Image (tube, rainbow, N blue to C red):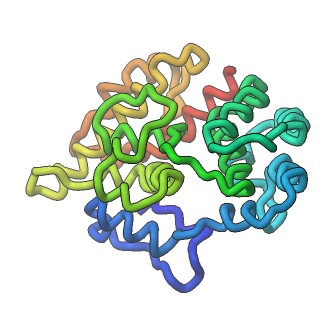
Amino acid sequence: MLVRMRHTRPGECREPAPDQLGSLRAIVEHYLRCYGEREWVAFHRSQRPIQKALEVVASFKDDNGKTYSHQSLVPRDAKQIAGRRIRRLELRDVTRFDEIFERVEAAIGSIRGVGELTVYDVAARIGASLGLMPDRVYLQSGARVGARIVLGRPIRERSLPADAFPTELQRLAAWQIEDVLCIYKDELARIPENDPSDQSRRLRATGRAWQLVEDEFADRPNCEGCDPRGRSDEGKRRLSRSMRPSSAAHAVPSPTSAWTRLSRCARRRS
């Protein structure tokens, strides 16, 4: 199981058995039980006034004074530049999250080393401070992979309305749907379809998730030569064939580990 158990409520969660997350409803219930109100939301919601809130967001540190894991690989100089621009944001007239997001993206989106995930994270933390959380599901990095698995199609949109997703997910706020799509992307890929064989369902799901990872990076010019198994350009060109479901699928890294490796490679080449 690849469910990340960090930042869950102490004593309430144990790592579930693989068959306990075999449906979207089970995943949502596990998320609500184990994550619920995320610590970062409560932390940034408590920051007042707005200038203090921006100072805290600009530090990229959580309530324990540690750098958020999403920004741990962002270059230090990029975070310093972004931090200065975040502190200068003018947000007194905003009334919706999309306005916050647009201003954050305009301020820091062009900084080398700052990707779409950091843009969203900064906007969401500011939104929590202002009481303006997303009313749409913003899709970046792992959340986009999860959305492609759930919706069964390529995702080109930057955000989608909550009602674009299955009913089970609509129990959640838009930002929580994004959270689930990212945290549980591997589990979403393993949700059974119609095949009665658990093994063939798992192998088919793994192959589908791998195809989504490959598609996501296929058109990125700065990722030429990246391969999730650390091989050459030729290895990447053979990715589609080698990642097809097979009896040896258990020997292939998970889609999440491949996504992480490809993302790092793309950043190095940008």
Residue 212 picture location, percent across and down: 37, 33
Q: Is residue 103 left or right of residue 31?
A: right
- In this view, the residue farthest toward the top is 221
Whole-percent x, y for residue 152 in the image: 28, 37
The quadrant in which residue 154 appears is top left
Compared across the picture, whether 225 is left or right of 101 comes to left
**Circle count:** 0
Q: Residue at x 36, y 63 (%)?
A: 27
Q: In the rendered image of this protein, does residue 15 appear above or below residue 197? A: below
Residue 102 lies, with reference to residue 133, above or below; the image says above
Whether residue 149 is situated above or below residue 103 in the rendered picture:
below
Q: Residue at x 67, y 44 (%)?
A: 95
> Which of the 4 image quadrants contains residue 112?
top right
Q: Choose between 136 and 8: the one closer to the eye.
A: 136
Q: Is residue 175 left or right of residue 116?
A: left
Residue 76 appearing in the image: no
Q: Position of residue 34 (x, y in %)?
A: 50, 73
- In which quadrant of the rendered view does residue 15 lie? bottom left
Locate the N terminus and report the quarter of the image it occupies.
bottom left
Q: What residue is at 67 percent from the left and 28 percent from the top?
A: 267
Q: Taking the image as drawn, is residue 117 in sight?
A: yes
Above or below, 152 against 200 in this view is above
Q: Nearer the viewer, residue 235 or 69?
A: 69
Please state the horizontal and vertical placement of residue 122, each as a whole percent of the image: 72, 45
Which quarter of the figure is the C terminus placed in? top right
